[in-house]
Image (cartoon, coloured by chain):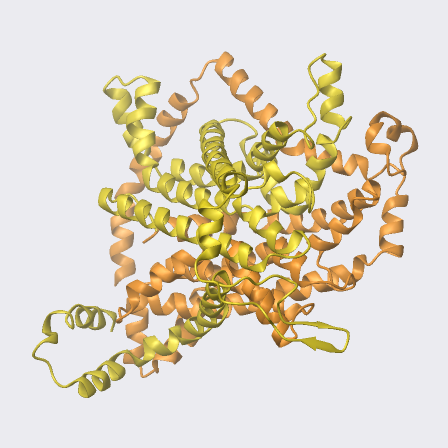
């Protein structure tokens, strides 16, 4: 069945010019594919209603000056109609090039890029290191593995609070640093240390996923390759470079892509670590957009939606380039 | 027939493997004691870092005063379970549990149903619009919450859905369904097409093939999609914090925040609640993690 369908699917592109009439082709297509369309109909409807419509609506909001003072709202029994107005692309202009655009957008943009790059780098290197250690035959391997995935097993919203207690002024981390006569930074107040703390917590939370995925990749590398390399006199470093890394390539490119997307969109850690209103300097674009839309009074809906659309454009451009680059090198495992 | 050919093919290979095994084991165990000590040392250090925050939370939850986290040494002398008693008796803990379960299970059910049908369609059939559907599914996973949260808030306000579980379930589905569809596609790809064909030859309708033959075979894949949906919906913070207003309806992710406001931080109760939430979830995660891990990587590494 599938075979027939697949070969049929390849054809329409070529024979379009001199085929039967449009109506007949539609009918023919319906008869051939109705089942496939029936299967995907639910998801198309769901995505259309839950993603497509809000997306269009959000895009329209970016062209208005909507905030919580002029949007439709209900106070008690009174319903107030929306009074916001269409203002064209002014929001984009204001955010990207307006006065203080650097403080409002570009500084957060730069920090988001640094945050994503550093976090994914740390996730990947630490994850790979631990996966290599765990891939050795030794005693207690399963036990270590179980301990090491604990940050993944406990929900993020729980562990972030634990970090918040530990990082507080005169919390346990600073007490330990004090006992060692090291400086005790104000993790949750000083803007540089806020950023350091955010990266530290996110690294802690994200390493287990990388470790487990890369461990799976390591275990799928054929051990005869290592034996052959050893026979040819390859050193440990050469074996790592010429057998392990190429063997991990498809897993790596997939988890790095996922890691970049997840880290770029990471909301919970920064939101919970610093609370709803503090730490403006440590906010990445996602949490900053949320702060504009829901963390302040009046709520700037249009601004927040504009940030959202900008974020999505950045991610879409990045993902399609990455996807194409990997497709060309034939590396993506998706 | 196929069984016999498999048997004969396997039997000559078996003794070879047995003969090879001991040699390889010996050689692999060759690393020197120093290397082994370093490896264990690194792993112990990493395990300590991985477990310390959770262990610390458990320790602090035993201290009776809200400022005990500043003097952790004092807790050892006055350990008590009073925080747990307080949380279970005098807070909305069970209400929150109910909300969390409704949201997580609702999301799981919807997510798995939609993902299974879509995953099957994109795994088995090539139809016009296939590529764009796959691209949309991939891209939707990359949606930052900031894109959807504002318009969703508007739409839900108009529909009167703010402060209902339905709103949170629906929003959760927008991110979970596409991911699970990818996951299920990866799983369905591992089920041979010949089974579908046999079903069709024996007179099953296309839907019959899916429901009676493929779905039962795909149960492990469905389970993985279900676990993933459940764990993700359980830990969702942004939408639940925004759309749930009544503190009786909070999920755990929102409720836990309510212990710590700008004016008052009840760290001891927060810690006790956190432990009560974390223990069952972590236990569940450890029970299913083998499936989850293989499932996630299978979805990711199979085309």
Query: Can you tell which quarter of the image residue B127 is in?
Result: bottom left
Q: Which chain corresponds to the colour orange?
A: B
**Nearest the eye: A243 or A143:** A243
Q: Quadrant of the N terminus of chain A?
A: bottom left
Tell me if residue B163 comes above or below residue B301 in the rendering: below
Q: Nearer the viewer, residue A196 or B150?
A: B150
Q: Position of residue A247 (x, y in %)?
A: 31, 35
Reply above or below: B147 against A96: below
Residue name at image x 57 percent, y 71 percent: B155
Q: Nearer the viewer, residue B65 or B297?
A: B65
- Residue A217 at what x, y percent from top left? 39, 39
Against B273, residue A225 (above or below) is: above
The extreme right residue here reads B78
Q: Is residue B23 left or right of residue B96?
A: left
Among the chains pictured, the one given yellow colouring is A
At 76% across and 64% down in the image, what residue appears?
B246
Q: Is residue B72 left or right of residue A190?
A: right
Residue A43 in the image: x percent, y percent? 44, 71
Q: Is residue B142 visible?
A: no
Q: Nearer the viewer, residue B241 or A192?
A: A192
A300 sits left or right of B7 in the view:
right
Image-quadrant location for residue B99: bottom right
């Amino acid at each position: 069945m599938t075979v027939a369908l697949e070969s049929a699917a390849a054809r329409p592109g070529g024979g379009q010019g001199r085929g039967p009439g449009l109506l007949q082709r539609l009918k023919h297509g319906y008869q051939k594919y109705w089942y496939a369309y029936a299967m995907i109909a639910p998801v198309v409807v769901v995505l259309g209603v839950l993603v497509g419509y809000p997306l269009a609506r959000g895009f329209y909001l970016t062209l208005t000056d909507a905030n919580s003072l002029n949007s439709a709202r209900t106070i008690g029994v009174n319903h107030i109609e929306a009074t916001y107005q269409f203002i064209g692309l002014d929001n984009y202009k204001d955010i990207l090039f307006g006065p203080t655009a650097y403080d409002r957008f570009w500084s957060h943009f730069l920090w988001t890029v640094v945050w994503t790059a550093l976090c994914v780098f740390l996730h990947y290197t630490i994850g790979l290191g631990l996966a290599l250690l765990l891939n050795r035959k030794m005693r207690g391997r399963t036990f270590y593995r179980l301990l090491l995935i604990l940050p993944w097993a406990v929900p993020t919203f729980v562990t972030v609070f634990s970090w918040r207690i530990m990082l507080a002024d005169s919390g346990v981390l600073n007490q330990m640093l004090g006992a060692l006569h090291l400086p005790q930074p104000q993790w949750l107040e000083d803007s540089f240390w806020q950023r350091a703390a955010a990266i530290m917590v996110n690294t802690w939370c994200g390493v287990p996923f990388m470790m487990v995925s890369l461990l799976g990749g390591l275990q799928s590398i054929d051990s005869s390759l290592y034996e052959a390399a050893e026979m040819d006199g390859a050193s440990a470093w050469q074996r790592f470079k010429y057998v392990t890394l190429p063997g991990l390539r498809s897993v790596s490119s997939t988890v790095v892509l996922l890691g970049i997307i997840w880290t770029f969109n990471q909301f919970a850690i920064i939101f919970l670590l610093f609370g709803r209103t503090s730490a403006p300097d440590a906010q990445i674009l996602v949490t900053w957009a949320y702060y504009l839309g829901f963390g302040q009074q009046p709520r700037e809906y249009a601004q927040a939606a504009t940030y959202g659309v900008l974020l999505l454009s950045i991610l879409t451009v990045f993902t399609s380039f990455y996807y194409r680059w990997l497709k060309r090198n034939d590396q993506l495992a998706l | 027939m196929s069984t016999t050919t498999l048997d004969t093919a396997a039997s000559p290979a078996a003794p070879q493997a047995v003969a090879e095994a001991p040699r390889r084991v010996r050689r692999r165990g060759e690393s020197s004691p120093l290397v082994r000590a370093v490896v264990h040392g690194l792993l112990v250090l990493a395990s300590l870092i991985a477990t310390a925050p959770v262990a610390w939370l458990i320790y602090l939850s035993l201290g009776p005063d809200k400022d005990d986290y500043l003097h952790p040494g004092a807790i050892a002398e006055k350990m008590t379970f009073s925080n747990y008693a307080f949380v279970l008796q005098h807070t909305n803990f069970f209400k929150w549990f109910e909300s969390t379960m409704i949201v997580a299970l609702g999301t799981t059910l919807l997510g798995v149903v939609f993902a299974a049908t879509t995953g099957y369609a994109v795994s088995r059939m090539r139809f016009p619009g296939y590529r764009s559907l796959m691209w949309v599914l991939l891209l939707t996973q990359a949606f930052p919450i900031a894109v959807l949260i504002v318009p969703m808030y508007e739409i839900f306000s108009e529909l009167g859905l703010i402060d209902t579980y339905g709103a949170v379930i629906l929003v959760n589905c927008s991110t979970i369904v596409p991911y699970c569809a990818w996951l299920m596609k990866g799983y369905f790809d591992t089920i041979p097409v010949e089974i579908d064909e046999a079903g069709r030859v024996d007179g099953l309708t296309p839907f019959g093939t899916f429901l009676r033959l493929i779905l039962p075979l795909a149960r492990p894949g469905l389970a993985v999609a279900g676990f993933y949906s459940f764990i993700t919906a359980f830990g969702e913070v942004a939408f639940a914090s925004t759309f749930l207003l009544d503190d009786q309806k909070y999920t755990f992710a929102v409720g836990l925040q309510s212990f710590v406001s700008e004016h008052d931080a009840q760290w001891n109760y927060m810690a006790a609640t956190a432990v009560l939430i974390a223990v069952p979830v972590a236990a569940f995660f450890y029970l299913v993690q083998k499936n989850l891990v293989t499932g996630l990587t299978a979805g990711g590494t199979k085309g």
